[in-house]
Amino acid sequence: MRQQSSTAVNAMLSQETDEVFLSCLRIEHPELPISLCFVNSRKKLVHNGEEYLGFPFQIDLPDDDSESVSEISLTIDNVDRQIVETLREISSPPTVSHFVVMASTPDQIEAGPFDMTLRSADYNSTTVTGKLCWEDFMNQKYPAHDYAPANFPGLF
């Protein structure tokens, strides 16, 4: 759990505030020469020396359901065809990081980063829609290794 700054806490608890919270998105993949970085704003944002393009997007959180693995829906305006071209070029799912900063302190992350994997994507002339998934750690083997002579010769 990340500790929010006192400025952010005061802004969240105030009836009125001049602070602006900005949602940022970073799409990374080993096959990409640079990461795709977006901020849900009309203006560009510089976060830790990296430029985030002002680009409209929407993240829809899943229902709180303990029976299934949560999927998050991401919708990005398809104004720039670079996103679709990038999705066509890569051979495996990219990593998507989402975090929130304040406009007054863009280098300080107030919420996140929430790292997910883009599992599927559809697009049309106006939007690119994708399904983001958390790592499914509930179905991973524990312990991760088998205690066999080949793996741990000193035990046997």
Image (spheres, rainbow, N blue to C red):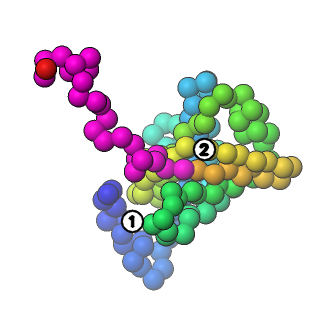
* Closer-to-camera residue (128/80): 128
Start-end of magenta stretch = 133-155
Circle 2 SS class = strand
Query: In the rendered structure, which amino acid carries the disc numbered 2?
Result: Leu
Query: In the rendered structure, which amino acid carries the disc numbered 1?
Result: Ala
Q: Main secondary structure of the magenta part?
A: loop
In the rendered view, tell whether residue 64 sits above or below residue 33.
below
Residue of label 2: 118
Residue 106 lies within the magenta run: no
Residue of label 1: 8
Determine the residue located farthest toward the bottom in the rendered image: 15
* Closer-to-camera residue (30/54): 30
Disc 1 crowd, CA 10 A, few/some/many (<14, 14-19, 20+) = some
Examine the image and state in which quarter residue 58 appears.
Answer: bottom right
Residue beneath the point at 40% across and 51% down: 138
Q: Position of residue 60 (x, y in %)?
A: 61, 63
Q: Position of residue 19 (x, y in %)?
A: 48, 67
Circle 1 SS class = helix
Left or right: 44 with respect to 98? Answer: right
User: Who comes first in sequence, dot 2 or dot 1?
Assistant: 1
Examine the image and state in which quarter residue 59 appears.
Answer: bottom right
In the rendered view, tell whether residue 107 sits above or below residue 14.
above
